[in-house]
Amino acid sequence: MTLRRSESLVVHECGTRRWARRAITGLARLRHRPVHLILIDTPSADALAGQRARGRSVRSRAFRRHERSWARLRDADPAALYREGWSSIRVLDRRDARALTAIRFD
């Protein structure tokens, strides 16, 4: 699939895997497109409840690994994340994420 320059693309990725973040920023760089990282910080219990509500099951071992990875990402030095190639980085809590009606990057 090829996108026109005026189109936006949203990638839903948990962001905890460095190789995935670098793949996304690398592809954006190849396309000469800005790339923005939006992280939604939610309590673990809420995240698991959301997974269950969507009919997904998450193994406890995998979820614990995700929690550790998320903590490292959340606490990372923003400068290190910007070096990956992000144009902007925002961390939202669940309430702020629910309130979004549109996202604009001007």
Image (spheres, helix red, strand yellow):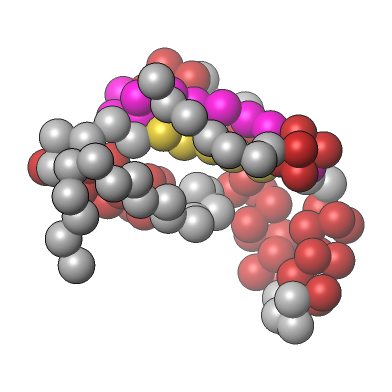
User: Per the image, is 81 magenta?
Assistant: no
Quarter in which the C terminus is drawn: top left
Query: In the depicted view, which residue is nearer to us: 95 or 25?
Result: 95
Res. 65 image quadrant: bottom right
From this view, report whether residue 8 is shown above or below residue 88.
Answer: below
Res. 105 image quadrant: top left
Image point (28%, 31%), residue name: 34
Quarter in which the N terminus is drawn: bottom left
In this rendering, position of residue 80 left or right of residue 52: left
In this rendering, position of residue 50 left or right of residue 58: right
Image point (35%, 24%), residue name: 87
| Stretch in magenta | 83-94
Measuring from the top left, give residue 18's x and y in whole percent.
40, 47
In this rendering, position of residue 93 left or right of residue 27: right
Image point (11%, 42%), residue name: 30
How many marks the image carries: the answer is 0
Q: Residue furthest top?
A: 79
In this rendering, position of residue 39 left or right of residue 34: right
User: Per the image, is 89 magenta?
Assistant: yes
Measuring from the top left, give residue 37's x and y in whole percent.
47, 36
From this view, report whether residue 31 is shown above or below residue 44.
Answer: above
Measuring from the top left, give residue 48's x and y in whole percent.
80, 65
Camera sees residue 73: no
